[in-house]
Image (cartoon, rainbow, N blue to C red):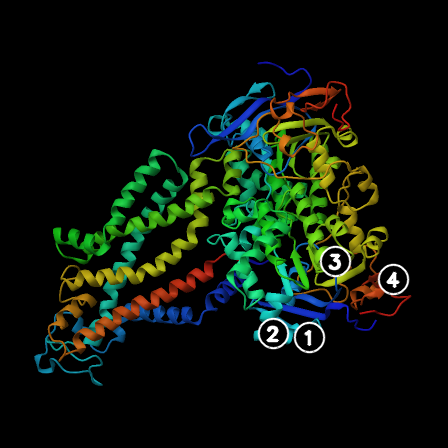
């Protein structure tokens, strides 16, 4: 078993997931060559809009989909298969919190029963001990213990999401995938959930793969951020670096579109680029750089040749023709 | 919250939803009435002995009157009493069929819906399609004709033609529930297929099953009446609604009460269970928090 | 402040209840709102605060179990709540247009885009010809910056992306001259880059045509970019009203402050605690100020009497007893 040198928990190598369509030979290229490394204790923000492939990447790592190509390494072991072929013990280690608390909890079961499922599946403790554990889990997310007798519809969206988090933590996982856990919630509730998530991360030494479309949130939560577009990562850097120095035109476009609430934030938004166009369908990926039809800085090369991912500065990776190694991107076409 | 208080609230809320539509309440009242009459028939009915082997030619063919509410038939038997007694056979048939058909059909539909895209699904659904293509009454007639005519055999015949409807219903529900996130959550957690089928998916399919069951009581009764109309099913002297209609048909239009009252009774039974079914559907409709 | 001619919509003391199992949900509790001609007004609030109920009341499209025991809604001088028949139809067909949150649900999947826009135009301007309607429809699509409008007329909604569908809805809403456009969370379901484009489109069209705008959103950032005047709504009442710049420079109500604090900032600074507590139970709302149970600056009077909107200077109003000292109750 290959041991990763720097305490890496999860490594994804050139992961691809294509879905077949009714037309022969035509695929939906949802994930088209994604590579990254997630260290223990890190929060990696995987950011993108719809069609970027961020959710599919997460679900493939989880095993919901089988990879079309590429590798997924967890704690040094290759786990690049679907759920059916994964050992039960692995399912204890990697868990997920879904986006919509309204549909991620079975409406016909009580909260206690819902939390009991992972415990029963992995045979954690005896019946009595499981009841204790359920109470513990509820306390962990600061919910009243008598919630275990309630049905999901009797509690609010934010509280349901807390239950979903408690469920994910029931088996003491090392990696938790968070699929836009607060997108469906109001901003004041979101703050509570995020707080809870970060507190739990510190206390239980968790590692998060955080899928989101909200860059402002990532600014405050992630250690590293990877921006995805049309199935590929177009930029990856540590959080302070990405926001201080966004290099890829798509990253800049995303940042410039965010509606902010203060002049201070307004000042940090890139000015030279405004959002235009729409993301093409992942069935019909443009040749060369996938972003070129919308890019105001595109050159001739951009429509022919796909740019490779390059480390432009230490720890800062960009996939763009305009940026030679070591040249800070300022959008100027040379 | 005390358990009893919780139950009272749930019942109250269920009743509120049920009773929004006045017709559902009418249906409920009628159904309760029918069941009570059927249960208490020997006690409640004016001439309980007329439901067996009985003749009284002196009082035969009398029109409806105060003594004989629905009149008498060729044997002098009180048609009202026989009609009420016939409720028993009808309800037994409906209950027997549904108790057999619902678990079996639902289980097949559940399995087919979950294992979508596999050969198991194809196998189950193709057989279901074959049975669905045959009209229930015709199929039941064909089977009954091969066996001795009894209530039990006619029940079996109806079962054979009835199960695919539940399979189809639950198949559709299971397919859509299967893609819900909570099912995915259970799969990711490593839950077994049995757990997912029976604990995650099935409870969320129950509402349409119950609604259909209520509606089906009426339809099974109708099919049963159709079978007894042609002499299959309960044999004389036990009264059966269909038989009474068919026997009386010879005497239309002069001795109209022989056929008309049993026919109205069939209609009322079917209608009341339909109305009840609507109410149950409203009651079980999930409200958003 | 006298009722100006330039006031388009004036809602006073609007109260709406919903009849449900177990009693009444007192959703709106004396809502006041005023929109001038050509003004862009934002209503900001979280889920369940009653913002959609308010605009549905303006258009009289509340659900069957809604009761309006008190309040008036004046539109161009006439009380909407008392309108019926012809007048009401004109209100909806010609006066006020609405764009909803989900463009997929707002467009009929079995009719082409062209058919749907032409239908709207037909009801807005009765007594015209199909050819005129068609021309107006194409022009509306062009104004909404939709590519190849002629061909778009023959497309069905499923052939368009979410952003394009919403643009079509906006085009439909503004195809004929309207006095007021109500947009209920028009971009919540869209990607952030598309949201930016659609919002800019709405602002441009509304300014060009001189149409007033009521924009409902849960995003303070969107309100900041799009409006001249912002109403902050909580649990069925307006808790703060101010010119947009003033509100963000100088937020006063504890709820507004809590909201602003909860929003993660692009400049960093971590994530705050949010606002403690939950929204009140509308079946049993707290007496007095509905925010009092969650407010860390609550005074005894807050749980006894409901504060009116007090004047904090410069058109800035706050429904909070802490600001009662200076001014008179304005509304």
Q: Is mark 2 in CB contact (under 8 Å) with mark 1?
A: yes
Taking A268 as reference, is B138 above or below it?
below
Between the C-alphas of marks 1 and 4, the distance is: 30 Å
**Residue at the left extreme of this rendering:** B57
Distance between mark 2 and mark 1 Cα atoms: 10 Å
Badge 3 crowding class, 10 Å Cα cut-off, few under 14, some 14 to 19, many 20 or more, is many
Rendered position, C63 above or below C227: below
**Same chain letter for marks 2 and 1:** yes
Position in image of residue C286 (x %, y %): 72, 64
Judge if badges 4 and 2 mark residues of a common chain: yes
* Residue at figure coordinates x 13%, y 65% from the top left: B236
Residue B53 relative to residue A55: left or right: left
From the top left corner, tell me how far across and down residue C64 is, in percent.
Answer: 55, 68
Label pair 4/2, CB-CB below 8 angstroms? no
Residue of label 2: C87
> Mark 1 — residue?
C78
Q: Give the farthest residue toward the top.
A: A2
């Amino acid at each position: 078993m290959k041991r990763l040198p720097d305490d890496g928990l999860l490594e994804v190598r050139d992961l691809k997931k294509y879905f077949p369509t009714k037309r022969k030979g035509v695929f939906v290229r949802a994930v088209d060559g994604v590579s990254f490394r997630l260290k223990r204790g890190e929060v990696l923000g995987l950011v993108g809009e719809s069609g970027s492939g961020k959710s599919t990447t997460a679900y493939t790592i989880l095993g919901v989909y089988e990879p079309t190509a590429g590798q997924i390494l967890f704690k040094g072991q290759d786990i690049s298969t679907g759920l059916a072929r994964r050992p039960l013990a692995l399912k204890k280690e990697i868990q997920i919190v879904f986006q919509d608390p309204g549909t991620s909890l079975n409406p016909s079961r009580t909260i206690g029963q819902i939390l009991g499922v992972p415990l029963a599946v992995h045979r954690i403790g005896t019946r009595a001990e499981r009841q204790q554990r359920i109470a513990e889990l509820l306390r962990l997310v600061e919910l009243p213990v008598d919630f275990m007798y309630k049905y999901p519809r009797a509690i609010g969206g934010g509280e349901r999401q807390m239950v979903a988090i408690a469920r994910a933590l029931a088996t003491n996982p090392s990696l938790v995938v968070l699929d836009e856990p607060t997108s469906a919630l109001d901003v004041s509730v979101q703050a509570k959930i995020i707080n809870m998530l970060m507190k739990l991360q510190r206390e239980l030494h968790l590692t998060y793969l955080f899928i989101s479309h909200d860059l402002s949130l990532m600014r405050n939560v992630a250690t590293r951020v990877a921006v995805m577009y049309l199935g590929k990562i177009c930029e990856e850097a540590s959080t302070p670096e990405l926001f201080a120095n966004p290099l890829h035109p798509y990253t800049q476009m995303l940042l410039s579109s965010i509606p902010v609430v203060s002049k201070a934030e307004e000042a940090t938004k890139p000015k030279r680029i405004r959002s235009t166009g729409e993301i093409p369908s992942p069935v019909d990926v443009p040749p060369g750089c996938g972003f070129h039809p919308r890019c105001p800085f595109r050159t001739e090369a951009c429509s022919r040749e796909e740019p490779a991912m390059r480390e432009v500065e230490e720890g800062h990776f960009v996939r763009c023709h305009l940026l030679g190694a070591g040249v800070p991107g300022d959008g100027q076409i040379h | 919250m005390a358990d009893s208080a919780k139950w009272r609230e749930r019942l109250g809320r269920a009743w509120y939803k049920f009773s929004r539509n006045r017709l559902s309440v009418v249906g409920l009242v009628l159904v309760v009435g029918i069941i009570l009459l059927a249960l208490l028939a020997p006690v409640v009915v004016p001439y309980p002995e007329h439901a067996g082997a009985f003749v009284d030619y002196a009082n035969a063919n009398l029109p409806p009157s105060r003594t004989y509410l629905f009149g008498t038939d060729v044997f002098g038997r009180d048609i009202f009493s026989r009609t009420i007694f016939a409720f028993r056979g009808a309800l037994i048939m409906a209950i027997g069929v549904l108790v057999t058909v619902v678990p079996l059909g639902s289980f097949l539909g559940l399995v087919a819906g979950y294992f979508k895209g596999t050969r198991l699904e194809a196998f189950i659904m193709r057989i279901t399609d074959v049975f669905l293509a045959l009209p229930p009454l015709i199929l039941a007639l064909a089977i009954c004709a091969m066996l001795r005519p009894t209530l039990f055999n006619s029940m079996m015949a109806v079962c054979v033609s009835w199960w695919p409807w539940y399979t189809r219903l639950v198949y559709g529900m299971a397919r859509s529930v299967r893609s819900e996130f909570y099912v995915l959550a259970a799969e990711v957690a490593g839950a077994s297929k049995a757990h997912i089928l029976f604990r995650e998916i099935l409870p969320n399919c129950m509402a349409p099953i119950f609604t259909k069951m209520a509606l089906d009581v009426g339809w099974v009764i109708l099919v049963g009446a159709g079978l007894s109309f042609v002499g299959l099913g309960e044999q004389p002297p036990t009264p059966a609604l269909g038989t009474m209609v068919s026997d009386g048909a010879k005497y239309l239009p002069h001795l109209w009460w022989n056929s008309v009252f049993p026919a109205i009774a069939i209609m009322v039974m079917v209608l009341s269970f339909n109305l009840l079914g609507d109410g149950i559907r409203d009651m079980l409709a999930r409200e958003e928090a | 402040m006298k009722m100006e001619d330039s006031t388009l919509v004036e809602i006073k003391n609007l109260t709406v209840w919903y009849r449900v199992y177990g009693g009444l949900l007192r959703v709106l509790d004396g809502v006041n709102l005023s929109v001038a001609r050509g003004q862009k007004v934002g209503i900001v609030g979280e889920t369940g605060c009653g913002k959609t109920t308010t605009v549905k009341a303006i258009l009289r499209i509340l659900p069957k179990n809604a009761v309006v025991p008190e309040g008036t809604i004046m539109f161009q001088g006439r009380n909407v709540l008392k309108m019926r028949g012809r007048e009401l139809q004109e209100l909806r067909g010609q006066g006020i247009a609405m764009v909803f949150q989900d463009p997929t649900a707002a467009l009929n999947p079995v009719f082409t885009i062209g058919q749907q826009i032409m239908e709207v135009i037909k009801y807005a301007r009765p007594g015209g010809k199909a050819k005129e309607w068609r021309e107006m429809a194409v022009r509306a699509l062009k104004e909404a910056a939709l590519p190849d409008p002629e061909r778009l007329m023959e497309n069905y909604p499923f052939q368009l992306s979410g952003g394009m569908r919403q643009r079509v809805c906006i085009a439909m809403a503004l195809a004929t001259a309207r006095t007021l456009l109500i947009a209920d969370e028009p971009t919540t379901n869209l990607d952030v880059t598309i949201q930016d484009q659609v919002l800019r489109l709405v602002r441009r069209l509304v300014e060009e045509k001189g149409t007033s705008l009521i924009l409902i959103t849960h995003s303070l950032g969107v309100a900041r970019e799009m409006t001249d005047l912002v109403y902050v709504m909580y649990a069925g009442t307006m808790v703060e009203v101010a010119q947009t710049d003033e509100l963000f420079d100088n937020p006063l109500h504890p709820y507004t402050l809590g909201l602003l604090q909860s929003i993660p900032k692009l400049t960093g600074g971590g994530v705050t605690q949010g606002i403690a507590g939950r929204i009140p139970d509308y079946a049993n709302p707290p007496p007095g100020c509905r925010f009092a149970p969650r407010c860390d600056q609550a005074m005894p009077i807050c749980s006894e009497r409901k504060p009116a909107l007090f004047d904090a200077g410069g058109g800035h109003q706050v429904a909070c007893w802490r600001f009662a000292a200076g001014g008179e109750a304005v509304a």
